[in-house]
Image: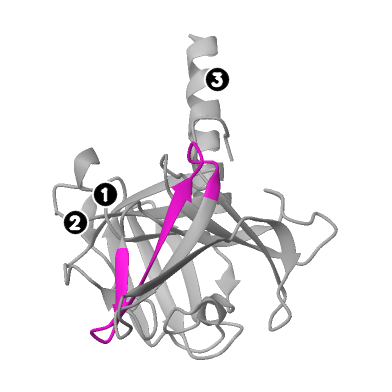
Amino acid sequence: MKILIILIILTISLFNLVKSQGYVTFQPYSSLKCSPDQQSGIGYSFLLNECISSVGDIGLENTNWKFTYDQTNNVVISQQFLNNDCSDSPSNIFKNGLNECSYSHPFFTMENYTYAQNETTFSYVTIANEPLYNKGQVIFEYHSKTNSGCSSLNLLFSLFFTPNLIFKQGEAVTKNYYCAFLNLTPYEQYCNYNNWPESCTSYSIANSCTSKENNNLNLKVFCKTIFNQE
């Protein structure tokens, strides 16, 4: 009986630790069912209980966010702030049920680009001790600038793109991210259909860890494959 009680206490403690120190991940889908064959869109993962003020530097609208977990109601609370230290009252608040599929946040979009498919996106929300990625996704991880470089010790947030996702800028320009060479190498493709014949350029964006000059972040870009556990 004592052993059972100890196991229950340890399980609850671990659960609470993950919810307070872990990452909330928003996996994108094209349907409210969030079935595996409907993955489509931009996904995000954020460190819980931290004011993250550099999100706008990666091309996303609205820069300052803080994510917390409400265990009583089993919801993830996303708060947007005007101040970089998240010290003001939140200007927007969104709530998503944990381990549920719901509408994606309207502010989680790429500036100047829209989905070529013009589709509404949905998110399946999870919390774990590390971001949860799926195979074939191109992942941009942003780390605080410390001696840890780009390790799990200083990861603040990430965004990732599902395979075959196309963005458009106006009617003639598109871009997409994909994994090539056995899904090991991330690429960006840019196409301009104003040209004739149409002009498309692809180049590798693989990045083991570099410092971004315009903020206090280190960037790592890679593909999620069956060969890595990152």
Q: Residue tagged by mark 2? A: 30
Tag 2: amino acid:
Ser
The mark nearer the N terminus, 3 or 2, is 3
Asked whether disc 1 touches disc 2, contact meaning CB atoms under 8 Å apart, the reply is yes
Q: Residues within 10 Å of mark 2 (few under 14, many from 20)?
A: some
Our reading of the magenta stretch's main secondary structure is strand
Position above or below: 215 against 32: below
Check disc 3 and give the amino acid type: Ile
| Residue 114 seen from this side | yes
The residue where tag 1 is placed is 39
Q: Check disc 1 and report its element: helix, strand or loop.
A: loop
Q: Residues within 10 Å of mark 3 (few under 14, many from 20)?
A: few
User: With respect to residue 229, does 30 lie above or below?
Assistant: below
Residue 149 image offset from top left, x and y in percent? 78, 57
Question: 91 or 156, which lies in front?
Answer: 156
Identify residue for label 3: 6
**Real-space Cα distance between discs 3 and 2?**
43 Å
Q: Earlier in the sequence, mark 1 or mark 3?
A: 3
Residue at 20% of width from left, 47% of height from top?
Answer: 38
93 on left or right of 215: left
What number is the disc on residue 20? none
